[in-house]
Amino acid sequence: MATGIPWVDETINPIVGCSKASTGCTNCYAEGMARRLASMGTEGYDNVITNGKWNGGVSFVPSALEKPFHWKKPRTIFIGSMGDVFHESVKSQWLDTMMGMIALNGHHTFILLTKRAKRMHDYMHLTVHQPLPNLVLGVSAENQQAADERIPLLLKTPAAKRFISLEPMVGPVDLLPFLWQDMNHNIIPQSGRPSSLSGVILGGESGTKARRLSPQWVRSVRDQCDRGEVPFMFKQGDKGWPEHNGFPVLDGVIHTDLAWTTRKGRNVNIEVPHVGL
């Protein structure tokens, strides 16, 4: 379905359901949406929610994999906005089917994002002999602990492109140790060799229980990405953050850079000095 996520054109959900993995999951937006979809009898959601919460169950909805075949014009497609495709309960056969669909739709770009970096790393090493050129892999890291656990695994995962999602960001994150690597993706801090990262997307929490996003955390990541020549998108501030064209403004600029192209075109940073913060 069409989506409001600014870094893709569409989302599909062949795998739905999840369980909370870390503090970044505390106010999970997908859990509330899944609760509503389950009450509506939507396919795949009847066994993933108990008493309004994720119960660790997952469902495979193969009909969702048919949609990209009907989209003739190239699109950027996020797979798995209503779960984690590398959740421990997801069967490898489901992932195999999903990878086959991606391989057969080379005119589209597909985005996978996970908090289960080890499952992704292990699966891709075992099953993917040649990285799919139209597949972008990412990990979500809400604070330094999550970054230290997940990003090194991402960097060692076979992929044509890799990215980091700092969303929801609930603490400061130092990315500099991950921005330089050798040929084997071993970390070589500030060696001058560019990172294999294709982008960093940062966002705060939304909703009434949203935790505070410090402008200093955002400035730090912006500066780190600039230093490492990594595309940076500041997707969402916290409540009350000034916006321009739907993006939060930081120091008179909206940061909308991407390493891949959506149907809207390659985003670029725009100066808006008349807006505060």
Image (spheres, helix red, strand yellow):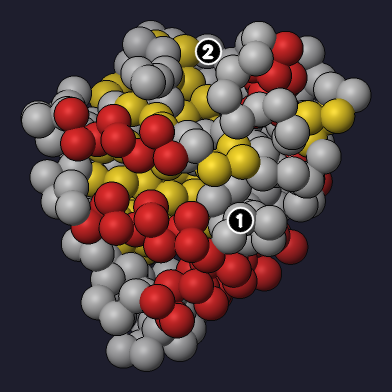
Residue depicted at 24% across the width and 64% down the height:
132
Three-letter amino acid code of the residue under disc 2: Pro
Q: Which residue is mark 2?
A: 242
Q: Residue 155's image quarter?
A: bottom left
Spot occupied by residue 54 in the image (x, y as percentages of width and height): 79, 35
**Left or right of residue 37, residue 4 in this image:** left
Q: Nearer the viewer, residue 151 or 42?
A: 42
Badge 2 crowding class, 10 Å Cα cut-off, few under 14, some 14 to 19, many 20 or more, is: some
In the rendered structure, the answer to whether residue 123 lies left or right of residue 129 reads right
In the image, 250 versus 108, the foreground residue is 108
**Residue 166 appears in view:** no
Disc 1 from disc 2: Cα separation: 39 Å
Q: Quadrant for the N terminus, please.
A: top left
Which quadrant would residue 185 be assigned to in this image? bottom left
User: What residue appears at the point 28 percent right and 31 percent down from the top-left corner?
Assistant: 67
Q: Position of residue 95 (x, y in %)?
A: 46, 58
Q: Nearer the viewer, residue 148 or 30?
A: 30
Indicate which label's residue lies in the foreground, 1 or 2: 1
Residue 143: percent from the left, percent from the top?
A: 70, 52
Q: Which residue is mark 1?
A: 90
Mark 1 burial class by Cα count in 10 Å: few <14, some 14-19, many 20+: some
Q: How many numbered markers are drawn?
A: 2
Does 191 sit left or right of 260 as displayed? right
Q: Secondary structure at mark 1?
A: loop
**Amino acid residing under circle 1:** Val
Left/right placement of residue 168 relative to residue 248 reads right
Q: Secondary structure at mark 2?
A: loop
Residue projecting furthest to the right: 51
Camera-side residue: 235 or 255?
235
- The image shows residue 226, relative to residue 43, as above or below, that is below
Q: Earlier in the sequence, mark 1 or mark 2?
A: 1
